[in-house]
Image (tube, rainbow, N blue to C red):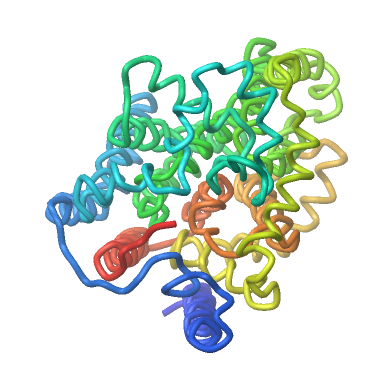
């Protein structure tokens, strides 16, 4: 066993110890002070070994990706690879969701009393609902919104309102929307990695983007849909800065504006966008040239919602109050500030932990190249990939330290987590690491009834 692989395994063992500590300490806090409000800390869910109609398909998809994924990723034409990645991700997410059955795994997740579909009937007059939105955020306000509606800007709820108006009513259609759109996030990440770090790292990363434990929570969660919108905003920005495309810059701005009106916390995706601009050659020239188109696109969604009477800043201020009125005000920061990271380990898997270890080694070992980037020297593909991934990790850590993410981060941080997965490209022995990813996802989905 070589030294690098041994260090990878040390990192995985340390991550496993973090998860074990979060489970043991969390169970103690849950059973005595009763402050966690989760049944199986650090995850939302409860113990219940089970199988379901999706079990055979999930095992089959995992076996195919482990066995043939690395070779197919290396040999397929690029466009065929993108299509294969999307199809494989769809199959993986759907099969894992159906392990819990159609109703509980897909329909039921979006029809609980906390979810967006509970508020669809209150948007029969959309302009009036938007003008009145902030009046129902606080927990003790008349007709207060369900938790997830209050916790997000109205574009999130409005998505399901428009699906309902189009005749796609109920949790089944909403679940299909989230899974179908959410599965494209890995394609967007792949596009960005290829443009910014090169085709070889992108091809090596492809199977890891498909076979991620994150798929357990992408089916079915609106946060998977948010992750896709955010990912495509970054991918289009990568197109804009590498191909000097005004249309891509405008599209990126438009989608980032929508991202900010889907989730307040996803404003932190600007850190990933900043990394994309940094990796452009030269970044200042690219930024100045594309900024007018980017800003024009970004202004569209905020302008529409503001003209409709929704005040984003006021809504966020009220949300902070609502957050501390509920479980967020009781859940202990001292536990969740590190237990959230244990959740992330379970979402991204052992391969990503080992990859992040290698990314750290790349950053340290090539710090001279980092200094040379300001002198217009070309950093290595490994270093470029490291910069992109570290930006997502920084966004995740800022979200963690903010105190506005206590529990449920296995779904809330999906938009950041998908950008950590490409570090699998830095690993040797990809099949063994992919098998570890698949095994973790299958165990989580079959041993726990996950939810939120």
Quadrant (top left/top right/bottom left/bottom right) for the N terminus = bottom left
* Residue at the extreme front of the image, as rendered: 142
70 or 168: nearer the viewer: 168
**Left or right: 346 with respect to 166?**
right
Tell me residue 448's x, y (percent): 31, 68
**Residue 124 in view here:** yes
Tell me residue 268's x, y (percent): 71, 44
Q: Where 376 falls versus 265 (above or below)?
A: above
What residue is rendered at 75% in x and 45% in y?
A: 318
**Left or right: 232 with respect to 312?**
left
**Left or right: 404 with respect to 434?**
right
What residue is rendered at 66% in x and 51% in y?
A: 140
What residue is rendered at 56% in x and 52% in y?
A: 413
Q: Could you say which quadrant of the image residue 403 lies in?
A: bottom right
What residue is rendered at 46% in x and 40% in y?
A: 222
Tell me residue 288's x, y (percent): 85, 20
* Residue at the extreme top of the image, as rendered: 247
**Residue 76 in view here:** no
Q: Could you say which quadrant of the image residue 429 lies in?
A: bottom left
Quadrant (top left/top right/bottom left/bottom right) for the C terminus = bottom left
269 or 22: nearer the viewer: 22
Q: How many marks?
A: 0
Q: Where 169 falls versus 30 (above or below)?
A: above
**Left or right: 345 with respect to 444?**
right
Q: Where 333 falls versus 140 (above or below)?
A: below
Tell me residue 266's x, y (percent): 65, 41
């Amino acid at each position: 066993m070589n030294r690098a692989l041994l260090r990878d395994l040390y990192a995985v063992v340390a991550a496993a110890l973090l998860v074990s500590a979060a489970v043991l300490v969390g169970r103690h806090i849950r059973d005595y002070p009763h402050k966690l409000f989760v049944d199986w800390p650090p995850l939302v869910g409860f113990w219940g070994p089970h199988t379901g109609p999706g079990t055979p398909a999930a095992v089959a998809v995992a076996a195919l990706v482990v066995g043939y994924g690395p070779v197919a990723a290396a040999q397929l034409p690029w466009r065929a690879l993108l299509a294969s990645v999307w199809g494989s991700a769809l199959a993986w997410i759907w099969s894992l969701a159906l392990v819990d059955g159609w109703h509980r795994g897909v329909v039921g997740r979006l029809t609980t009393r906390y979810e967006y579909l509970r508020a669809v009937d209150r948007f029969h007059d959309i302009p009036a609902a938007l003008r009145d939105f902030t009046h129902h955020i606080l927990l003790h306000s008349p007709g207060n919104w369900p938790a997830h509606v209050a916790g997000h800007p109205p574009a999130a709820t409005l998505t399901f309102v428009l699906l309902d108006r189009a005749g796609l009513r109920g949790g089944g259609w909403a679940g299909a929307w989230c899974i179908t759109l959410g599965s494209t996030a890995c394609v967007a990440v792949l596009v960005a990695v290829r443009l910014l770090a090169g085709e070889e790292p992108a091809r090596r990363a492809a199977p890891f983007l498909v076979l991620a434990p994150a798929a357990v929570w992408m089916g079915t969660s609106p946060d998977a849909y948010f992750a896709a919108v955010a990912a495509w905003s970054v991918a289009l920005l990568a197109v804009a800065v590498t191909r000097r495309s005004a249309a891509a810059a405008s599209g990126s701005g438009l989608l980032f504006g929508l991202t900010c009106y889907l989730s307040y916390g996803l404003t932190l995706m600007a850190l990933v966008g900043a990394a994309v601009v940094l990796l452009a050659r030269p970044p200042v020239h690219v930024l100045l040239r594309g900024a007018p188109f980017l800003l024009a696109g970004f202004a569209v969604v905020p302008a529409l919602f503001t003209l409709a009477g929704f005040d984003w800043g006021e809504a966020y201020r009220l949300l902070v109050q609502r957050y501390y009125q509920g479980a967020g005000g009781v859940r202990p920061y001292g536990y969740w500030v590190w237990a959230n990271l244990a959740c992330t380990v379970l979402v991204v898997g052992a391969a990503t932990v080992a990859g992040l270890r290698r990314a750290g080694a790349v950053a340290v070992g090539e710090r001279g190249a980092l200094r040379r980037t300001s002198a217009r020297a070309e950093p290595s593909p490994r270093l470029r990939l490291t910069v992109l991934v570290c930006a997502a990790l920084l966004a995740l850590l800022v979200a963690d330290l903010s105190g506005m993410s206590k529990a449920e981060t296995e779904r809330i941080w999906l938009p950041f987590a998908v950008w950590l997965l490409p570090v699998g490209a830095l690993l040797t022995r990809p099949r063994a690491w992919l098998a570890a990813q698949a095994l973790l996802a299958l165990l989580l989905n079959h041993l726990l009834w996950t939810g939120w």
